[in-house]
Amino acid sequence: MNDDFEQLDDYAILGIRPGASFADIKQAYLKQISLYHPDRYAGASAAEQEYAARRARRINQAYQNLRRRRSSMAPATPVQRDYQAELYAQAQVHLAAGRRLQALATLRELQRINPWYRDCAALIAELEAEYQTPATAAEPTISRRTLLTAAVGGLTLTFLGWYGWRQLQGAMTVQEIDNRPPTAPPTAPTPPTAPSPTTAPTPPAVPSPTTAPTPPAVPSPTTAPTPPAAPSPTTITASGPIIYQADFGPNSDWPTTSGNGWSVSASNGAYRIQANAGIGDIWAFRTSPIGADMMIEVEASVIGDWGGLMLRFNGPQRYVSFVINPASGQFRCDERNGEQRTLLAEGAIILAERTRLSARLEGQSIELRINDQVVSIVTSATPPPDARYGLLARAGQNATTATFSNLVIRALR
């Protein structure tokens, strides 16, 4: 049976006339997607939920088609702004609010653009004296925080996020300021810098890679292997006590924030990451209370392109992702190391509207499970094991919404 909207063109599915302005297209898109967003059909029948999901995908596709068509007709006019003045004003706001570490990072970025801007050098010297941190040294330890400095089309912005929010791509570049060298071994001791009162506990030492079980047919870290198309027929039940269970309610310790074309939020027991088409990876992360060896489990619902788990988060450009695309019935696991991405595993699998993803991390071994079935086992030393993990949405050709619930961390034994 064909859907009643299959014969509608891009304008008709959004309910607008051909030649509409981009503002009208966007307004119509927001209205239509709000009517058929799957969250509105949570209590409906299975048939109604499936219909809403199909129509939402068609609405997203129509919006992206019309947006690209409008973009090709007339180039955008750049907005002229005084970026240096904005950075300086931002630093002053941080100082007035007592956020002196954020002010120091913002002033350093301004100094890289213009070393002689107003009293920038004097303020940096004053703040560095407080922290006893020279400009060439790493920042003091920030408990579960990541300082991101982004340059966007000539505009330089600095964000201090509680758990690191997104992977900026395209015209944006990201610098993570942290006192842990990215190549340091997992068992490196905590630096002697005085920790923040909220510093996350130091994870236990990660076992030597030689103690990790050797999975069958281990691919080289630089080789893009092709795993079996079907998951293992053996169902694996959860094992090990639950150490952490996420609370995605009003008092959630996961961040709620938004940017240009993306947002992350926690409400009603679910965590939602939304990204416009072409944004790339949007994520939020936390630190495991038991170190790098653990079992992560979460239920995921993805509309658009890809969504899933972020593992071994060593920095904004060093992590492993385990994601699914229900629309195409695919899963994949890849690692990012700088600008290079290496495919570790991929395959086809039947995915439900809400899919249980699990990752068992022990040493350099990562066992990937979908609905309690092992779909692949990969081994990689890059990026090295890390206690930080996260949730991720990857928006390529389509706007993407990834919704997560029932996230738990288990001990391996």
Image: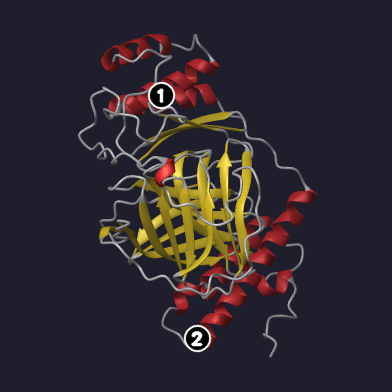
Q: Which mark is residue 376?
A: none
Among the two numbered marks 2 and 1 on one chain, the one whose residue lies closer to the N terminus:
2
Residue 124 rendering spot, x and y as whole percentages: 37, 14
Q: Which of marks 2 and 1 is in front?
A: 2
| Type of amino acid under label 2 | Ala
Residue 281 rendering spot, x and y as whole percentages: 55, 49
Find the residue positioned furthest to the left. Answer: 197
Q: Which residue is drawn at 78% across and 50% down?
A: 72
Label 2 neighbour load within 10 Å: few <14, some 14-19, many 20+: few
**In the depicted view, which residue is nearer to us: 274 or 208?**
208
The quadrant of the picture occupied by the N terminus is bottom right
How many numbered marks have been drawn onto this rendered protein structure?
2
| Type of amino acid under label 1 | Ala
Q: Is residue 357 above or below residue 197?
A: below
Find the residue positioned furthest to the right. Answer: 73
Residue 142 rendering spot, x and y as whole percentages: 31, 32
Mark 2 = which residue? 46
C-alpha gap between disc 2 and disc 1: 51 Å
Q: Residue 105 carries which label?
A: 1
Check contact, mark 2 vs mark 1: CB within 8 A: no
Q: Which residue is drawn at 40% across and 56% down?
A: 265
